[in-house]
């Protein structure tokens, strides 16, 4: 995606063995690139949400394993294997809900030959990490193509811009490029289909208000930020044609875990006969899970994110307290929308009923049985 006319991915590596990423803690007020030089730094960047979003967390984990390979390049094969295993545990612990994290670290461990000569070992680790990132880009691009077919069909029945509501940020910032929920939106915009996006602010961290609004603006897509509780009202008044969200983990049976508050949008969409789509690459699907509600680990973050809010004050990013001193708060990061509320899942292989994922990916199901 372009930032002020220049193309960027959200994460990449340089020739000196560093990983570079867009610092999402600073957006939308400052656009800056941070340098990540070791496994602990990468785990901290993931946990602190300098890098965030399902696909980007996966790519970051792949690059984190590459940094581990650099650190253990001169070790004996058994020590390299132990070093990679330790890095994998450190990275996997950074955020529990996004499946792409453990999927990516497992992928590096499974495909990296620890007996290679030093330079080849590091080179191979870098190539695997690049492959994970490149694949994410390609899968998101295809999700855009498949989702565009849905948006075109929906637009055929309205004589005004299509209104899509999205929650949180499943945009290119949440992946390596394109995004998932936003990929069909960008494809529609680029194809000249008139489209307007309702952007849920997404408390407590405001990924919608801060990140989705910023990236839609960079791409020139019409959008309006709304507080999280407005969606139902908009739907009751015919102001939403479709809800399009991403996912951090989806069960094989189509239960969609996504940013907290998504379930309520799905309920409102169902009550108003509005299609509710979740877009995700297959790397987000938990092929071992048959019940998302009971089997998805739900991240709880620091209550401080609820009791305080950060914004720009006189040009300076400032954190202010919202609640009375000593107020107890709890901060669940995600909820699960049961498959019965999901109209369809948009993947890199096409769109399917939420309960038909196994039919679209028989090879993945087989790998996990
Ligand atoms: O906590 P985050 O910002 O990493 O959460 C991820 C999200 O932005 C969403 O839930 C998103 O819709 C799915 S990730 C593409």
Image: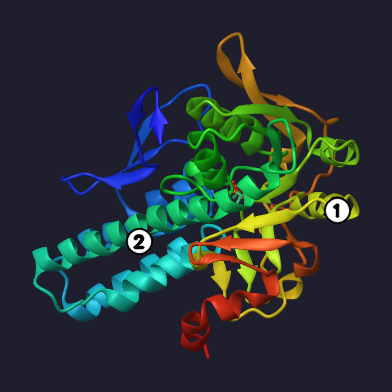
Q: Which residue is mark 1?
A: 273
The secondary structure type at the circle numbered 2 is helix
Q: Tell me if residue 76 comes above or below residue 276 in the rendering.
A: below
Residue 64, position in %: x, y? 35, 57
Q: Quadrant of residue 352?
A: bottom right
Q: Label 1: how many residues lie within 10 Å, few (<14), some (14-19) or many (20+)?
A: few
Residue 4, position in %: x, y? 39, 22
Q: Residue furthest top?
A: 314
Horizontal arrangement in the rendering, residue 37 relative to residue 102 (left or right): left
User: Residue 349, which numbered label?
Assistant: none
Separation of residues labelled 1 and 2 (CA atoms): 37 Å
Q: Which residue is mark 2?
A: 132
Q: Label 2: how many residues lie within 10 Å, few (<14), some (14-19) or many (20+)?
A: many
Q: Earlier in the sequence, mark 1 or mark 2?
A: 2
For the point 68% across and 62% down, the residue is 344
Horizontal arrangement in the rendering, residue 133 relative to residue 246 (left or right): left
* Disc 1 + disc 2, Cβ < 8 Å: no
Residue 291, position in %: x, y? 72, 77
Residue 158, position in %: x, y? 74, 38
């Amino acid at each position: 995606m372009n930032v002020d006319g220049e193309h960027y991915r959200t994460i990449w590596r340089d020739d000196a063995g560093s990983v570079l990423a867009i610092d999402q803690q600073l957006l939308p007020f400052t656009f800056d690139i941070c340098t990540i030089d070791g496994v602990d730094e990468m785990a901290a960047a993931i946990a602190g949400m300098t890098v965030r979003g399902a696909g980007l967390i996966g790519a970051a984990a792949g690059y984190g394993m590459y940094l581990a390979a650099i650190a253990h390049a001169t070790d004996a094969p058994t020590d390299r294997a132990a070093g990679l295993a330790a890095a994998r545990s450190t990275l996997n612990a950074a955020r529990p809900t996004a499946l792409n994290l453990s999927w990516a670290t497992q992928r590096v461990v499974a495909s990296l030959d620890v007996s290679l000569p030093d330079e080849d070992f590091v080179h191979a680790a870098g190539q695997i990490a690049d492959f994970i990132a490149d694949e994410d880009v390609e899968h998101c691009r295809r999700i855009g193509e498949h989702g565009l077919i849905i948006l075109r069909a929906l637009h055929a029945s309205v004589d005004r811009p299509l209104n899509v509501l999205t929650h949180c940020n499943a945009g290119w910032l949440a992946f390596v490029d394109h995004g998932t929920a936003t990929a069909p939106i960008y494809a529609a915009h680029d194809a000249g289909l008139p489209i307007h996006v309702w952007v849920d602010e997404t408390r407590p961290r405001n990924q919608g208000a801060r990140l989705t609004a910023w990236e839609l603006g960079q791409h020139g897509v019409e959008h309006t930020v709304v507080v999280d509780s407005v969606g139902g009202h908009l739907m009751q008044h015919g102001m939403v044609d479709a809800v399009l969200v991403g996912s951090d983990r989806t069960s094989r049976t189509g239960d969609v875990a996504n940013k907290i508050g998504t379930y309520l949008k799905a309920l409102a969409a169902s009550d108003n006969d509005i299609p509710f789509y979740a877009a995700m690459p297959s790397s987000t699907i938990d092929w071992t899970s048959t019940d998302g509600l009971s089997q998805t680990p739900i991240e709880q973050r620091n209550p401080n994110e609820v009791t305080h809010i950060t914004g720009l004050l006189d040009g300076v990013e400032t954190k202010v307290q919202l609640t009375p001193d000593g107020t107890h708060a709890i901060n669940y990061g995600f909820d699960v929308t049961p498959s019965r509320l999901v109209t369809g899942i948009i993947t890199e292989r096409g769109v399917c009923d939420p309960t038909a994922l196994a039919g679209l990916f028989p090879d993945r199901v087989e790998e996990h049985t």
